Amino acid sequence: MFEKLSLLILGFLLTTIGGGFVATLLQQRAWRHKWEVENAEKHIETAKQIFEEVSRLMDKRLFRVEQLSVWIRRADRKRVHLSLENYRNVMFDWNDNINRHLAMLQIYFGNDIREDFDFRVGAKFVETGAGTEAAYRDFVSGKDVVASLSAVRDLIAELRAEVYQYNLTMLTRIESHKQTQKVHDLLSDIDAIFRSSVEVAQRPTTIP
């Protein structure tokens, strides 16, 4: 009788202490996971906002430089000067935000995305803008602009492809973050299953 009572007490202590310890660990892990999920969701949402802002600015700059080249080709002086002013306004907006955009791209998308924006897409924008402005100077001075506009047209086509590819790369990176988040959610479900198992194990066991 005493031996059975001792085993009952020992089993109760082991179950209570051991189960409680495991439950505490799982609870802490669940809290940590919840914090990670919330941060991941904020990260993804901020990344979306950065994508929209950068993508919109690239599209605007591309459109403005293309419009300037179109009106130069059509020799419409009034619209040429208006397009040049619109283009320069976009350039001010671009330059005013360039360091902030570069920093946020590096933090939320990675150093490779940041460098692509600075040295690949950005460089193509600079090249295209320089070619268009050279065509504008030729136009204002009365020179033939057929050759220079032909080169600008090719540059704009290349730039459009670069912008599209860059947008696609950013969207793919965001989708990758979403898939990672789904994996974390699955791990959370596994934690819940383990926690339920521990609760069952903590229930008193009757020894015959």
Image (cartoon, rainbow, N blue to C red):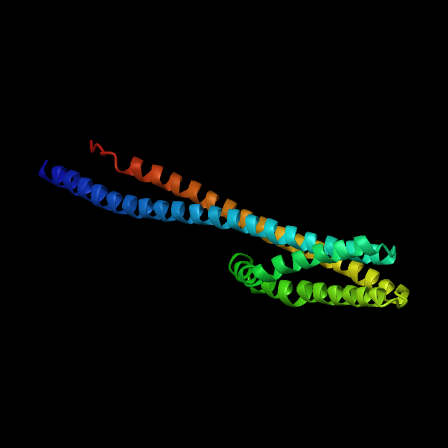
Q: What is the residue that sits farthest to the left in this orientation?
A: 2
The residue drawn where x is 30% and y is 37% is 199
The answer to whether one can see residue 130 in this image is yes
Q: Position of residue 66 (x, y in %)?
A: 78, 55
Residues 117 and 141: in front is: 141
Give the tally of numbered discs. 0
The answer to whether one can see residue 66 in this image is no
Q: In the rendered view of the protein, which quadrant contains the N terminus?
A: top left
Residues 101 and 204: in front is: 101
Q: In the rendered view of the protein, which quadrant contains the C terminus?
A: top left
Q: Is residue 139 left or right of residue 57?
A: right
Q: Position of residue 82 (x, y in %)?
A: 75, 54
On screen, 142 above or below 27? Answer: below
Q: Position of residue 10 (x, y in %)?
A: 16, 43
Residues 155 and 161: in front is: 155
On screen, 156 above or below 42? Answer: below
